[in-house]
Protein backbone atom coordinates (compact mmCIF):
# COMPACT_ATOMS: atom_id res chain seq x y z
CA UNK A 1 0.00 0.00 0.00
CA UNK A 2 2.78 2.39 0.89
CA UNK A 3 4.46 1.66 -2.43
CA UNK A 4 1.22 2.23 -4.35
CA UNK A 5 0.59 5.50 -2.50
CA UNK A 6 4.10 6.68 -3.26
CA UNK A 7 3.62 5.90 -6.96
CA UNK A 8 0.33 7.80 -6.92
CA UNK A 9 2.05 10.85 -5.42
CA UNK A 10 4.75 10.72 -8.10
CA UNK A 11 2.15 10.47 -10.89
CA UNK A 12 0.24 13.43 -9.48
CA UNK A 13 3.42 15.48 -9.19
CA UNK A 14 4.38 14.63 -12.79
CA UNK A 15 0.93 15.51 -14.01
CA UNK A 16 1.02 18.80 -12.17
CA UNK A 17 4.45 19.64 -13.63
CA UNK A 18 3.34 18.95 -17.22
CA UNK A 19 0.01 20.74 -17.15
CA UNK A 20 -0.11 23.75 -19.55
CA UNK A 21 0.07 27.22 -18.01
CA UNK A 22 -2.74 29.70 -18.65
CA UNK A 23 -2.26 32.45 -21.32
CA UNK A 24 -0.01 35.24 -20.18
CA UNK A 25 -2.05 38.43 -19.86
CA UNK A 26 -0.67 41.50 -21.64
CA UNK A 27 -1.01 44.70 -19.68
CA UNK A 28 -3.13 47.22 -21.60
CA UNK A 29 -1.08 50.13 -23.01
CA UNK A 30 -2.08 53.20 -25.05
CA UNK A 31 0.69 54.69 -27.21
CA UNK A 32 0.73 58.05 -29.01
CA UNK A 33 2.89 58.82 -32.04
CA UNK A 34 4.81 61.03 -32.66
CA UNK A 35 6.14 60.43 -29.13
CA UNK A 36 5.29 63.34 -26.84
CA UNK A 37 7.96 65.11 -24.84
CA UNK A 38 10.70 64.89 -27.48
CA UNK A 39 10.49 68.51 -28.64
CA UNK A 40 8.98 69.87 -31.86
CA UNK A 41 8.40 67.23 -34.55
CA UNK A 42 8.20 67.38 -38.34
CA UNK A 43 4.74 68.34 -39.58
CA UNK A 44 4.50 65.90 -42.51
CA UNK A 45 3.32 62.93 -40.44
CA UNK A 46 0.06 61.75 -38.95
CA UNK A 47 -1.07 61.48 -35.35
CA UNK A 48 -1.47 57.81 -34.42
CA UNK A 49 -2.93 56.29 -31.24
CA UNK A 50 -2.38 52.55 -30.73
CA UNK A 51 -3.91 50.22 -28.12
CA UNK A 52 -2.10 47.06 -26.97
CA UNK A 53 -3.98 44.48 -24.90
CA UNK A 54 -7.32 46.29 -25.31
CA UNK A 55 -9.41 48.23 -27.83
CA UNK A 56 -9.72 51.96 -28.13
CA UNK A 57 -12.70 53.84 -26.84
CA UNK A 58 -12.76 57.58 -27.46
CA UNK A 59 -9.89 59.45 -29.11
CA UNK A 60 -10.11 63.23 -28.95
CA UNK A 61 -7.57 65.39 -30.78
CA UNK A 62 -7.67 69.16 -31.18
CA UNK A 63 -5.49 71.93 -32.58
CA UNK A 64 -6.25 75.52 -31.56
CA UNK A 65 -9.54 74.25 -30.15
CA UNK A 66 -10.66 72.66 -33.42
CA UNK A 67 -11.17 68.89 -33.72
CA UNK A 68 -8.75 66.88 -35.84
CA UNK A 69 -10.49 64.28 -38.04
CA UNK A 70 -9.28 60.69 -38.02
CA UNK A 71 -10.39 57.07 -38.39
CA UNK A 72 -10.12 53.78 -36.49
CA UNK A 73 -8.96 50.51 -38.03
CA UNK A 74 -11.34 47.54 -38.24
CA UNK A 75 -10.25 46.07 -34.89
CA UNK A 76 -10.37 49.48 -33.20
CA UNK A 77 -6.82 49.09 -31.96
CA UNK A 78 -5.43 52.01 -33.98
CA UNK A 79 -6.58 55.57 -34.70
CA UNK A 80 -4.91 57.73 -37.36
CA UNK A 81 -5.46 61.37 -38.25
CA UNK A 82 -6.82 61.90 -41.74
CA UNK A 83 -4.20 64.47 -42.74
CA UNK A 84 -0.64 65.44 -41.79
CA UNK A 85 0.11 67.86 -38.98
CA UNK A 86 0.28 71.60 -39.53
CA UNK A 87 3.59 73.44 -39.02
CA UNK A 88 4.08 75.53 -35.90
CA UNK A 89 1.09 74.13 -34.01
CA UNK A 90 0.34 72.37 -30.73
CA UNK A 91 -1.90 69.28 -30.80
CA UNK A 92 -3.72 67.98 -27.73
CA UNK A 93 -4.47 64.25 -27.71
CA UNK A 94 -6.63 62.30 -25.25
CA UNK A 95 -7.33 58.57 -25.62
CA UNK A 96 -9.35 56.18 -23.46
CA UNK A 97 -9.94 52.43 -23.25
CA UNK A 98 -11.32 49.89 -20.76
CA UNK A 99 -9.57 46.71 -19.59
CA UNK A 100 -11.47 44.29 -17.31
CA UNK A 101 -13.74 47.13 -16.28
CA UNK A 102 -10.83 49.40 -15.41
CA UNK A 103 -10.45 52.63 -17.41
CA UNK A 104 -7.11 53.21 -19.16
CA UNK A 105 -6.34 56.75 -20.36
CA UNK A 106 -3.48 58.79 -21.75
CA UNK A 107 -3.01 62.40 -22.81
CA UNK A 108 -0.28 64.32 -24.59
CA UNK A 109 0.56 67.65 -26.19
CA UNK A 110 2.64 67.45 -29.37
CA UNK A 111 4.34 70.47 -30.96
CA UNK A 112 5.39 70.76 -34.59
CA UNK A 113 8.18 73.01 -35.76
CA UNK A 114 7.44 76.04 -37.92
CA UNK A 115 8.05 76.02 -41.68
CA UNK A 116 10.85 78.18 -43.05
CA UNK A 117 8.99 78.52 -46.36
CA UNK A 118 5.32 77.98 -47.18
CA UNK A 119 3.20 77.19 -50.23
CA UNK A 120 -0.48 78.01 -50.69
CA UNK A 121 -3.06 77.80 -53.44
CA UNK A 122 -2.94 81.17 -55.22
CA UNK A 123 -5.75 80.63 -57.74
CA UNK A 124 -8.17 77.99 -58.99
CA UNK A 125 -10.19 77.86 -62.18
CA UNK A 126 -13.19 77.35 -62.46
CA UNK A 127 -14.34 80.10 -60.13
CA UNK A 128 -16.30 79.08 -57.02
CA UNK A 129 -19.89 78.32 -57.97
CA UNK A 130 -19.26 78.74 -61.70
CA UNK A 131 -21.25 76.73 -64.25
CA UNK A 132 -18.92 75.43 -66.96
CA UNK A 133 -18.86 73.37 -70.12
CA UNK A 134 -18.22 69.62 -70.21
CA UNK A 135 -14.58 70.02 -71.31
CA UNK A 136 -13.54 72.41 -68.54
CA UNK A 137 -10.18 71.64 -66.86
CA UNK A 138 -9.39 72.37 -63.22
CA UNK A 139 -6.36 74.68 -63.09
CA UNK A 140 -4.56 75.05 -59.75
CA UNK A 141 -1.82 77.66 -59.39
CA UNK A 142 0.43 77.79 -56.31
CA UNK A 143 2.15 80.87 -54.92
CA UNK A 144 5.60 79.22 -55.01
CA UNK A 145 7.39 76.41 -56.89
CA UNK A 146 6.52 72.82 -55.96
CA UNK A 147 9.54 70.52 -55.71
CA UNK A 148 7.84 67.39 -54.33
CA UNK A 149 4.90 66.98 -56.69
CA UNK A 150 3.64 63.51 -55.75
CA UNK A 151 2.62 64.44 -52.17
CA UNK A 152 0.82 67.50 -53.52
CA UNK A 153 -1.12 65.39 -56.03
CA UNK A 154 -2.11 63.04 -53.20
CA UNK A 155 -3.42 66.07 -51.32
CA UNK A 156 -5.61 67.28 -54.21
CA UNK A 157 -8.99 65.53 -54.06
CA UNK A 158 -11.58 65.87 -56.83
CA UNK A 159 -15.05 64.61 -55.98
CA UNK A 160 -17.25 64.26 -59.06
CA UNK A 161 -18.80 60.83 -58.54
CA UNK A 162 -17.40 57.31 -58.79
CA UNK A 163 -18.08 57.18 -62.55
CA UNK A 164 -15.61 60.00 -63.32
CA UNK A 165 -11.97 59.09 -63.89
CA UNK A 166 -9.43 61.89 -64.03
CA UNK A 167 -5.81 62.81 -63.40
CA UNK A 168 -3.46 65.73 -62.82
CA UNK A 169 -0.74 66.92 -65.18
CA UNK A 170 2.00 69.40 -64.24
CA UNK A 171 2.44 72.18 -66.80
CA UNK A 172 4.93 74.33 -64.84
CA UNK A 173 6.75 74.37 -61.50
CA UNK A 174 3.76 76.02 -59.82
CA UNK A 175 0.73 74.95 -61.88
CA UNK A 176 -1.08 71.62 -62.25
CA UNK A 177 -4.13 70.79 -64.40
CA UNK A 178 -6.86 68.20 -63.79
CA UNK A 179 -8.71 66.68 -66.74
CA UNK A 180 -11.25 63.86 -66.70
CA UNK A 181 -10.61 60.97 -69.05
CA UNK A 182 -13.82 61.80 -70.89
CA UNK A 183 -15.92 64.94 -70.88
CA UNK A 184 -17.66 65.68 -67.58
CA UNK A 185 -21.23 64.37 -67.25
CA UNK A 186 -23.70 67.20 -67.79
CA UNK A 187 -25.25 68.59 -64.61
CA UNK A 188 -22.59 67.15 -62.34
CA UNK A 189 -21.38 69.05 -59.25
CA UNK A 190 -17.61 68.88 -58.75
CA UNK A 191 -15.70 69.66 -55.56
CA UNK A 192 -11.96 70.26 -55.27
CA UNK A 193 -10.29 70.03 -51.86
CA UNK A 194 -6.59 70.79 -51.51
CA UNK A 195 -5.43 69.29 -48.19
CA UNK A 196 -2.07 71.07 -48.29
CA UNK A 197 -1.66 71.70 -44.57
CA UNK A 198 1.44 69.86 -43.36
CA UNK A 199 2.44 68.51 -46.78
CA UNK A 200 6.20 68.77 -47.30
CA UNK A 201 6.49 70.48 -50.66
CA UNK A 202 10.25 71.05 -50.75
CA UNK A 203 13.25 71.47 -48.48
CA UNK A 204 11.99 73.16 -45.30
CA UNK A 205 8.85 74.04 -47.27
CA UNK A 206 5.35 73.06 -46.15
CA UNK A 207 1.76 73.72 -46.99
CA UNK A 208 0.07 75.76 -44.29
CA UNK A 209 -3.54 76.10 -45.48
CA UNK A 210 -6.21 73.95 -47.09
CA UNK A 211 -8.37 75.17 -49.96
CA UNK A 212 -11.81 74.03 -51.07
CA UNK A 213 -14.01 75.09 -53.97
CA UNK A 214 -16.79 73.71 -56.13
CA UNK A 215 -18.42 74.23 -59.51
CA UNK A 216 -21.22 72.77 -61.63
CA UNK A 217 -21.05 71.27 -65.11
CA UNK A 218 -23.80 72.71 -67.29
CA UNK A 219 -25.55 71.31 -70.36
CA UNK A 220 -23.51 69.27 -72.85
CA UNK A 221 -22.83 71.69 -75.70
CA UNK A 222 -20.39 70.67 -78.45
CA UNK A 223 -19.63 72.75 -81.53
CA UNK A 224 -18.05 71.36 -84.68
CA UNK A 225 -16.48 73.54 -87.37
CA UNK A 226 -15.59 72.22 -90.81
CA UNK A 227 -13.28 74.79 -92.39
CA UNK A 228 -13.48 73.01 -95.74
CA UNK A 229 -17.28 73.20 -95.88
CA UNK A 230 -17.13 76.54 -93.99
CA UNK A 231 -19.91 75.52 -91.65
CA UNK A 232 -20.34 75.44 -87.87
CA UNK A 233 -22.89 73.25 -86.08
CA UNK A 234 -23.77 73.62 -82.39
CA UNK A 235 -25.33 70.63 -80.61
CA UNK A 236 -26.80 70.23 -77.15
CA UNK A 237 -27.25 66.71 -75.83
CA UNK A 238 -26.76 65.57 -79.43
CA UNK A 239 -29.49 67.80 -80.87
CA UNK A 240 -28.65 70.56 -83.36
CA UNK A 241 -29.51 73.98 -81.90
CA UNK A 242 -27.66 76.27 -84.34
CA UNK A 243 -26.10 76.12 -87.80
CA UNK A 244 -23.77 78.90 -88.88
CA UNK A 245 -22.01 79.71 -92.12
CA UNK A 246 -18.46 80.76 -91.22
CA UNK A 247 -15.21 82.01 -92.67
CA UNK A 248 -11.95 80.65 -91.22
CA UNK A 249 -8.27 81.56 -91.57
CA UNK A 250 -7.07 82.32 -95.08
CA UNK A 251 -3.95 80.17 -94.65
CA UNK A 252 -1.64 82.68 -96.36
CA UNK A 253 0.79 82.38 -93.44
CA UNK A 254 1.20 80.03 -90.48
CA UNK A 255 -0.35 82.47 -88.00
CA UNK A 256 -3.25 83.16 -90.38
CA UNK A 257 -4.12 79.45 -90.50
CA UNK A 258 -6.87 78.27 -88.16
CA UNK A 259 -5.76 75.41 -85.90
CA UNK A 260 -7.51 72.05 -86.15
CA UNK A 261 -8.27 70.12 -82.97
CA UNK A 262 -10.33 70.10 -79.81
CA UNK A 263 -10.53 73.67 -78.53
CA UNK A 264 -12.32 74.91 -75.44
CA UNK A 265 -14.06 78.24 -75.03
CA UNK A 266 -11.88 80.18 -72.60
CA UNK A 267 -13.35 83.66 -72.18
CA UNK A 268 -15.55 86.14 -74.01
CA UNK A 269 -15.66 89.88 -74.47
CA UNK A 270 -17.61 92.45 -76.45
CA UNK A 271 -15.83 94.05 -78.18
CA UNK A 272 -12.25 92.76 -78.50
CA UNK A 273 -9.39 94.69 -80.11
CA UNK A 274 -7.33 92.55 -82.50
CA UNK A 275 -3.92 93.65 -83.78
CA UNK A 276 -1.81 91.71 -86.28
CA UNK A 277 1.04 89.82 -84.56
CA UNK A 278 4.59 90.92 -85.30
CA UNK A 279 3.58 93.68 -87.72
CA UNK A 280 3.67 97.46 -87.57
CA UNK A 281 1.54 100.09 -89.26
CA UNK A 282 2.29 100.06 -92.96
CA UNK A 283 3.56 96.46 -93.05
CA UNK A 284 1.82 94.04 -95.44
CA UNK A 285 -0.96 92.23 -93.64
CA UNK A 286 -1.15 94.74 -90.77
CA UNK A 287 -4.55 95.19 -89.13
CA UNK A 288 -6.03 96.81 -86.04
CA UNK A 289 -9.71 95.91 -85.63
CA UNK A 290 -12.43 95.85 -83.01
CA UNK A 291 -14.73 92.87 -83.30
CA UNK A 292 -17.99 92.18 -81.49
CA UNK A 293 -19.18 89.14 -79.53
CA UNK A 294 -15.78 87.45 -79.41
CA UNK A 295 -15.36 84.05 -77.73
CA UNK A 296 -11.70 83.02 -77.26
CA UNK A 297 -10.78 79.41 -78.13
CA UNK A 298 -6.95 79.48 -77.95
CA UNK A 299 -3.98 81.58 -76.87
CA UNK A 300 -2.78 82.11 -80.44
CA UNK A 301 -5.42 84.74 -81.13
CA UNK A 302 -8.29 82.54 -82.27
CA UNK A 303 -11.86 83.58 -81.51
CA UNK A 304 -15.34 82.85 -82.75
CA UNK A 305 -16.63 86.36 -83.40
CA UNK A 306 -18.99 88.53 -85.40
CA UNK A 307 -18.09 89.94 -88.81
CA UNK A 308 -20.28 91.53 -91.46
CA UNK A 309 -18.45 89.92 -94.41
CA UNK A 310 -21.53 87.85 -95.23
CA UNK A 311 -20.31 87.37 -98.80
CA UNK A 312 -17.42 85.18 -97.53
CA UNK A 313 -19.21 83.14 -94.85
CA UNK A 314 -19.96 79.69 -96.17
CA UNK A 315 -18.01 80.53 -99.35
CA UNK A 316 -14.37 81.43 -98.66
CA UNK A 317 -11.86 81.43 -95.80
CA UNK A 318 -10.68 85.03 -95.52
CA UNK A 319 -9.90 85.66 -91.83
CA UNK A 320 -6.57 86.03 -90.03
CA UNK A 321 -7.15 82.71 -88.22
CA UNK A 322 -10.38 83.37 -86.35
CA UNK A 323 -13.80 81.90 -87.05
CA UNK A 324 -16.18 84.67 -88.04
CA UNK A 325 -19.94 84.42 -88.45
CA UNK A 326 -22.90 86.67 -89.17
CA UNK A 327 -23.40 89.24 -86.36
CA UNK A 328 -26.71 87.79 -85.19
CA UNK A 329 -25.43 84.23 -85.03
CA UNK A 330 -22.15 85.26 -83.41
CA UNK A 331 -24.16 87.12 -80.76
CA UNK A 332 -26.20 83.95 -80.17
CA UNK A 333 -23.04 81.86 -79.72
CA UNK A 334 -21.60 84.50 -77.40
CA UNK A 335 -24.73 84.49 -75.23
CA UNK A 336 -24.98 80.69 -75.08
CA UNK A 337 -21.33 79.80 -74.40
CA UNK A 338 -19.89 78.62 -71.09
CA UNK A 339 -16.20 78.42 -70.32
CA UNK A 340 -15.05 74.92 -71.19
CA UNK A 341 -17.47 74.23 -74.05
CA UNK A 342 -15.66 72.08 -76.66
CA UNK A 343 -15.22 73.55 -80.14
CA UNK A 344 -13.86 70.91 -82.52
CA UNK A 345 -12.28 72.27 -85.72
CA UNK A 346 -11.25 70.19 -88.74
CA UNK A 347 -9.95 70.81 -92.24
CA UNK A 348 -6.65 72.70 -91.83
CA UNK A 349 -3.02 71.57 -91.82
CA UNK A 350 -2.15 73.46 -88.60
CA UNK A 351 -2.77 71.37 -85.49
CA UNK A 352 -3.75 72.94 -82.18
CA UNK A 353 -0.95 72.46 -79.65
CA UNK A 354 -2.01 70.82 -76.39
CA UNK A 355 -0.48 73.79 -74.52
CA UNK A 356 -2.06 76.44 -76.74
CA UNK A 357 -4.73 77.84 -74.46
CA UNK A 358 -6.75 74.96 -73.08
CA UNK A 359 -5.86 72.43 -75.77
CA UNK A 360 -5.53 69.67 -73.18
CA UNK A 361 -7.96 67.35 -74.98
CA UNK A 362 -5.43 67.13 -77.80
CA UNK A 363 -3.48 64.64 -75.68
CA UNK A 364 -4.47 60.98 -75.49
CA UNK A 365 -5.22 59.64 -72.02
CA UNK A 366 -1.85 57.87 -71.94
CA UNK A 367 -0.06 61.08 -72.90
CA UNK A 368 -1.99 63.01 -70.28
CA UNK A 369 -1.03 60.55 -67.54
CA UNK A 370 2.64 60.86 -68.44
CA UNK A 371 2.59 64.37 -66.98
CA UNK A 372 1.47 63.18 -63.54
CA UNK A 373 3.92 62.79 -60.68
CA UNK A 374 2.14 59.60 -59.59
CA UNK A 375 2.63 56.10 -60.98
CA UNK A 376 -0.63 55.91 -62.92
CA UNK A 377 0.57 54.12 -66.06
Image (tube, helix red, strand yellow):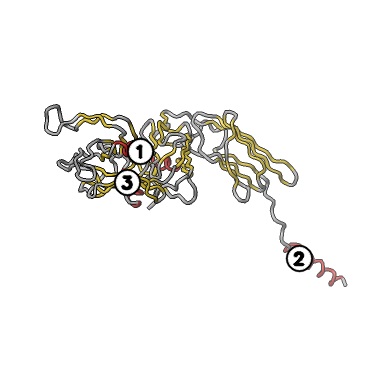
Place of residue 120 in the rendered image (x, y in percent of width and height, measured from the top left): 43, 31
Q: Position of residue 229 (x, y in %)?
A: 24, 50
Residue 259 locus on image (x, y percent): 24, 44
Task: Return the x and y of residue 18 as percentages of the image width and height.
Answer: 72, 64
In the visual, does 224 lie left or right of 54? left
Say which label, 2 or 3, has the lower sequence index.
2
**Of the two numbered discs 2 and 1 in the rendering, the one whose residue sits closer to the viewer:** 1
Q: Is residue 131 left or right of residue 225?
A: right
Q: Quadrant of residue 138?
A: top left
Residue highlighted by disc 1: 332
Report the residue at 42% width, 30% height from top.
118
Q: Nearer the viewer, residue 26 or 94?
A: 94
Query: Considering only order in the chain, which callout, 1 or 2, is on the residue closer to the N terminus?
Result: 2
- CA–CA distance in space, label 2 to label 3: 99 Å
> Regarding mark 1 in the picture, which secondary structure is present there?
helix
**240 vs 93, nearest the viewer:** 240
Mark 3 nearby-residue class (10 Å; few <14, some 14–19, many ≥20): some
Residue 264 vertical placement versus 24 (above, below): above
Q: Mark 1 or mark 3, which is nearer the start of the sequence?
A: 3
Residue 198 is at least partly visible in this image:
no
Question: SS of the residue at dot 2?
Answer: helix
Which residue, given by chain and number where applicable, does mark 3 sit on? 243
For mark 1, does the 10 Å Cα neighbourhood hold few (<14), some (14 to 19), or many (20 or more) residues? few
Identify the residue shown where x is 42% and y is 49%.
Answer: 237
Amino acid sequence: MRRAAACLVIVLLLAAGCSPAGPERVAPVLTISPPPGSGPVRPDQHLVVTATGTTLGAVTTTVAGRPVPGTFDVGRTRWRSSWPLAPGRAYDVAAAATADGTPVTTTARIHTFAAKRTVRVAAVSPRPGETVGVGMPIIVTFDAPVSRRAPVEHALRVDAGDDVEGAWRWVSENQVIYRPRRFWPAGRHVTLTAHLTGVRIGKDTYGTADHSTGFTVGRRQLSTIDTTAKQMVVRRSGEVVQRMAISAGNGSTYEYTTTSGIHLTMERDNPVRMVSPGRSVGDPGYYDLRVDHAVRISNSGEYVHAMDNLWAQGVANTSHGCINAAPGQAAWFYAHSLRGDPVIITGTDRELGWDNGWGYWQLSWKEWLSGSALSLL
